[in-house]
Image (spheres, helix red, strand yellow):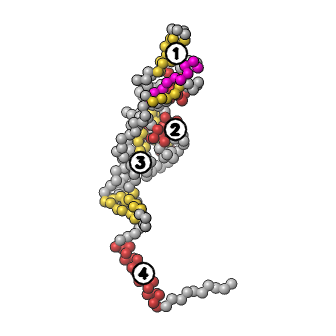
């Protein structure tokens, strides 16, 4: 095999290459072009919609189970409280941070944060009980500034700003669309009363129809929270959610 010859440079080319290298080094000292975030001394500024650690507000929860139903990773389980209501627990060992639970919560009880670097010593600690979801975890911060990426047509630059970015997002929770449960086919009702048992707001009741001498289900539209739990559990699938 023929060896590849080592290129030879004359003195002019060598001086030019060294001058270029020194100029690049000097430019990096004066105006660095690095786009690397020096974590943990600085953090990247995430948008308010960043899908991070999830907080829970029990005052806004209507115990509709929607977060546990919609979770694709089966990371949310409902826990019965002393009041008799059911509140979510979250297993971060399973959570994929899709935030379907936050987006679908009709009462706005779940909300996002920019916290993304929670550490655990074992898998058991990743199971977060309801009480632990109310307040954010302990945050030890070493950052003295935050960075933002700015993209132009010609280049990508990093803007550095002194100060700390707020990790707890102060955004009003979604109010959702007011809904109410209705029966669309009362003739098919088998009076199993499952809807009454699962209704957390007590909106479902039963009354005797004197004309046909049968028991009819009634839903109080003022009391109904539109959680949809009765719709999910109806064995005859005759309940629907409609706009108020």
Give the residue drawn at x 57%, y 26%.
Answer: 237
Residue 24 location (% of width, % of height): 40, 77
Residue in the foreground of this view, choosing between 87 and 157: 157
How far is disc 3 from disc 2 in space, using C-alphas? 19 Å
- Classify mark 3: helix, strand or loop: loop
Earlier sequence position, callout 1 versus callout 3 = 3
Give the residue drawn at x 41%, y 48%.
Answer: 49
Outermost bottom residue: 11
- In the rendered image, residue 170 lying in the magenta stretch gets the answer no
* Quarter residue 130 falls in: top left
**Residue beneath label 2, please?**
70
**Residue beneath label 1, please?**
216
Earlier sequence position, callout 3 versus callout 4 = 4
**Residue beneath label 4, please?**
20
- Classify mark 2: helix, strand or loop: helix
Give the residue drawn at x 35%, y 58%.
Answer: 146
Residue 96 location (% of width, % of height): 51, 47
Residue 143 location (% of width, % of height): 35, 57
Outermost left residue: 163
Residue in the foreground of this view, choosing between 96 and 19: 19
Earlier sequence position, callout 4 versus callout 2 = 4
25 left or right of 214? left
Q: Are marks 2 and 1 in contact (CB under 8 Å)?
A: no
Location of residue 42 with respect to 33 vertically, above or below: above
How far is disc 1 from disc 4 in space, using C-alphas? 88 Å
Residue 210 location (% of width, % of height): 51, 8
**Residue beneath label 3, please?**
49
Residue in the foreground of this view, choosing between 228 and 238: 238
The boundaries of the magenta stretch are 179-188
Q: Nearer the viewer, mark 1 or mark 3?
A: 1
């Amino acid at each position: 095999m023929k060896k590849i010859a080592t290129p030879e440079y004359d003195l002019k080319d060598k001086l030019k290459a060294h001058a270029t290298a020194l100029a690049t080094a000097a430019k990096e000292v004066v105006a660095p072009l690095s786009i690397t975030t020096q974590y943990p001394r600085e953090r990247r500024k995430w948008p308010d919609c960043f899908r991070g650690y999830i907080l829970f507000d029990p005052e806004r929860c209507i115990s509709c189970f929607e977060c546990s139903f919609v979770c694709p990773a089966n990371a949310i389980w409902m826990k019965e409280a002393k009041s008799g209501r059911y509140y979510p627990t979250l297993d971060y060992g399973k959570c994929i941070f899709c935030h379907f639970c936050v987006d679908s919560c009709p009462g706005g009880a779940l909300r996002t944060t920019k916290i993304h670097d929670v550490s655990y010593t074992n898998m058991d600690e990743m199971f977060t009980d309801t009480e632990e979801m109310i307040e954010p975890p302990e945050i030890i911060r070493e950052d003295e500034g935050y960075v933002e990426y700015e993209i132009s047509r010609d280049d990508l630059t990093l803007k550095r700003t002194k100060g700390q970015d707020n990790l707890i997002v102060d955004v009003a929770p979604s109010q959702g669309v007011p809904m109410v449960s209705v029966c669309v086919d009362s003739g098919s009702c088998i009076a199993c009363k499952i809807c009454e048992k699962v209704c957390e707001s007590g909106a479902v009741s039963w009354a005797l129809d004197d004309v046909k001498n049968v028991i009819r289900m009634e839903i109080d539209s003022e009391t109904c929270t539109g959680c949809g739990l009765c719709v999910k559990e109806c064995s005859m699938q005759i309940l629907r959610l409609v706009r108020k």
